[in-house]
Every structure is written in structure tokens, then in C-alpha cells.
Amino acid sequence: MSTWLREQTLPSPVHTGADGRRADLLGRSRDHGPRHTSQVTADGAEWLASASPHPAATLARWGTRPGTPAVLPCGTVFDVVNVPAIFGRRLLDRLWDEGPGSGPVAAHLGRMLLFTAPGTGQRLPALLGWEEWGDAVPPLLCHGVGDAVTIPPPASGAAEGPRWLVAPDTRSPWLPGPEVLLWACVRVARATSAGDVRVSISPDVDRGANVYDVSRRR
């Protein structure tokens, strides 16, 4: 059994069949130690896998190879808004300092992937098009129905490749919708234009994970 799986499951009697293996994988530890938001919990893995056409196979693969990234479709369980890293840092600072927090967030290839409510990928560009400050927002890649994204593995992997900044930790994580992201984008654009750019609490997206207080998430 992998290290990730041992840390995420409770000792249990021997199970047989697919249901038993799934129960072992999804049994969460109930201790009350500190929660590391850069580490996916078993409940979070179940939520991610629910986006796959074959959730059981996805969970089984993570059970044996938890350091393996996956490609999951958008549009049903979540959408993804892909933003430049620097803008993404400022966006997260606004969401966590002045707003409701964020959903899961990953970093990959110098960009940030914000997991959002389904429909956001289609609606957000339209809202930005009507917004006075929309032109000040850098180009966003909005992934929705018909798109797929590479997500980080549940367990911490190599230094290279995708990784979690705010990892999913429940089976029903709160996800920001288009209006929340529009608010945050406009706030960042206005601050940048006025020269009021604060130092980010995540100094370098390429140096490990920034830890946010998930207890403040709405």
C-alpha cells in the first residue's frame, strides 16, 4: 500500500471485491491534526475522480500510483479558469484576503488553474466583455464543457509538473462562480492600474505550495 494511501485510510477489516477496495481507499483519517491544503485527502480524491468517465478506475490507479497526474474533463463537476501565474497570485490574495476564499487551485507550466463552478468557463468571458475593466485583465483560458485539463496527483510528486496550491479536501468543495471571479479580476485590475499592487503571500509559485487557511472558505 502506498504512503499516501496509508496516511489517508483507517485500519479496517479485510474486504473483498471492488466495494471493499473502494472503502479502503476512501476511509479518511479522523485525527484532528493540522490540515495541509497542498495534500489531497481521500474525500478530495473521490470528488476529483467523480469528474472522470470511469471514477472507479481513476481511484484504483491513484491507489497504486498516487503520484500520477490525471487528465479530467471539465463541465460537469467543475470548470477550470487558467490564468498567468503573477495575476493568479494577486487573484488568490484578493479572494482570500477580501473575499470568500477559493476552490481548489493548482499550478502548472507557469500558470494557475482555479477550479470553479460548472458554467464559469462559458460565462466569465462574457461578463468580462461587458466590464469596464475587462481589457485590463490578462487573457484567461476558460475550460468548460468539451475541454479537459491535466490535474496534479493526489500525493506530492516530483518538483516538476503540476502541483496543488489549494488541494481538494472534501467530497463537495465550495467552488467560486463567474460573479465571484469577475469581482476578484476587476479588483486586481484596478489595483494594478493604480499602482496599488501588494506583495503576494505566495512569493514564488514555482517554489512549493502556498498554504491558505481553508477554514475561512465559505
Image (spheres, grey):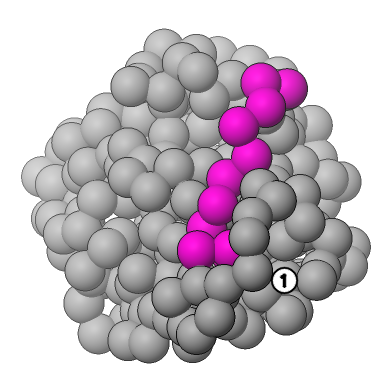
Location of residue 3 by image quarter? bottom right
Q: Amino acid at mark 1?
A: Pro
Q: State the SS at label 1.
A: loop
Depth order, front residue of 87/98: 98
Residue extent of the magenta highlight: 23-33
Depth order, front residue of 141/36: 36
Identified at 38% across, 48% down, the residue is 171
Instruction: Give the dominant element type of the magenta stretch: helix, strand or loop.
Output: loop
The answer to if 35 sits in the magenta stretch is: no
Location of residue 80 by image quarter? bottom left
Where's the N terminus, which quadrant?
Answer: bottom right
Location of residue 34 by image quarter? top right
Is the residue 212 above or below the residue 174 in the image?
A: above
Q: Is residue 17 visible?
A: yes
Residue topped by disc 1: 66
In the rendering, at what x and y percent does residue 57 appear?
49, 87
Circle 1 Cα neighbour tier, 10 Å, few/some/many (<14 / 14–19 / ≥20): many
Identified at 54% across, 80% down, the residue is 16
Where's the C terminus, which quadrant?
Answer: top left
Identified at 66% across, 74% down, the residue is 63
Identified at 46% across, 16% down, the residue is 216
In the rendering, at what x and y percent does residue 213 appear?
59, 20
